[in-house]
Amino acid sequence: MEDPRQEQSRREREAVLSEYGTWRLTGDEDAPVAAEVGTLETLLRLRDQQQDAPDPGWWTEELMTQLLTEIVPRTVVQPRERVMDMVPTLSRFFTYLVETGRWSPDSMPVTEAPAALAALEFATLEAAEDPSRRSFSTNVLGHGIALGVDLEDDEQLAGYMHWYNSLPDDERVQLSDTGRLPSPTVAFDRERAVQAAREDRRASSSWPWFLPAPEAEDSIALGDLAQGEDLEVYAASRFVRRAAAILELVGEEGVRITSTGALGRADCRALLTDGEGSGPAVRSMWDRPELTGPWITLLDGGWLEIVGGRALARPGPVPYLPLGSDSDGFVEFGHAVLTAALFGKEARDAEDGGFRGMPDTLAALLAACSSSGLALPEPFSEDPGAPEIPWDPATGQWDRDELRRYVAVARDLDDLAAVGILEREGRRFTGSPAVMVALVALIRDQNDPPPEDQQRLL
């Protein structure tokens, strides 16, 4: 679910770009508006996501330099001519901002902007051509562009990646590190590569290709599961602790909430430090998933109610009892709130914050709750052991549905780690016995039994 700040930023970005297109055509009917808007959309989105700069009219020399010489080379794959057009396009955008009154008063002086941009023109091109400033994927895909591969053509892209994966390890490392491979063992031939990709399509499987096969020794029998009455497990859960802290903060008298239905900044800071210190800077509760997740679950489960601009504590299905006053009661509350979190995500649509990857996410969660946890691989990793995206035999391309399966599950696991239900170290996810107990409750609530492969995990 897109939080209110992100939604507002996106809408403002779209409005500004639409207005810019109209403004640009007014001055030049033959202007390449679509290409310029595409470039600007990328720049404005990266500013918002990686520089915390959502205002399209706010520009400083430091922000421009970091954006064009660090962020863009690391994240954007584009031909040299498009890189050369970035600064001129941005210069025209600045003129639009000034003429329409959108240039922020907090920006650099308008008179200094042209010189600052001109000074960046060569630096931008130099940064784009420096492999040390690019990521693994931008180096590999950038070489594909140099070979004439149309990255928008799925078939050509699949053939190129098949050729890349067929190279010896040392050549793949060289290409990913430098973006160049002057003398490959096997020369790239586009038609041959596309044909080879078609012929090498792996047979698809109902079990998620990016998850390890279920092992019998990792099986957990439902009848042998502890009932969750392990005080230490629930006391260690970040999600349960945060939910308890929210209820203690709200208390019997309740607390004022913002117009968006969130806790105020001071309350958020207090929760994020558990009462210690002054707390981190917080713009909105909706920016902090470790607060938003428990907050929504407490509302869903009936532990909180919004009345007249105040959040009020309610008994809920299982009353909250503090850890120090009633250990058994705290365990019951912990189990109830974790279960409510999973049930709430299962009940919601994906666009409203629900699970995106079910039933594959279920299989991934079961693996994460096993003794070894789940190391979610990167499909585009240079690691020779990384799984390959299955091919679609009908098209000879990457199977887009299979790639979507991976992305959906990865986002679900990331979300659960962000709110504190799972633990994450790098790309390894682990779930506690308390999460497993809540997961079993969700499985039992399903109308249909789990697939055979998933039953083995249970």
Image (tube, rainbow, N blue to C red):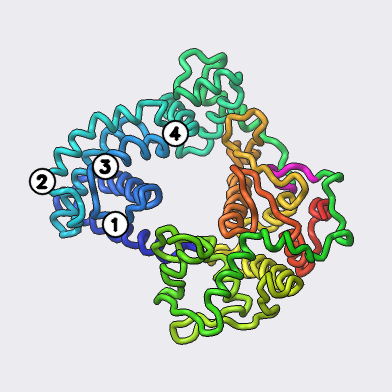
Q: Which residue is drawn at 76% across and 72% down?
A: 328
Q: Does residue 213 belong to the magenta stretch?
A: yes
Most common secondary structure along the magenta stretch: loop
Mark sitting on residue 55: 1
The one nearer the camera, 9 or 269, is: 269
C-alpha distance separating marks 1 and 4:
33 Å
| Image spot of residue 287 (x, y percent) | 45, 61
C-alpha distance separating marks 4 and 3:
34 Å
Answer with left or right where residue 318 lies relative to residue 244.
right
The answer to whether 32 is drawn above or below residue 173 in the figure is below
| Image spot of residue 272 (x, y percent) | 50, 61
Q: Image quadrant for the C terminus?
A: bottom right
Q: Mark 4 points at which residue?
A: 150
The one nearer the camera, 322 or 302, is: 322
Q: Mark 2 points at which residue?
A: 111
Name which of mark 2 and mark 4 comes first in the sequence.
Answer: 2
Q: Are marks 2 and 4 in contact (CB under 8 Å)?
A: no
- Give, as a single range, the part of the protein colored magenta: 207-214
Mark sitting on residue 62: 3
The amino acid at mark 4 is Asp
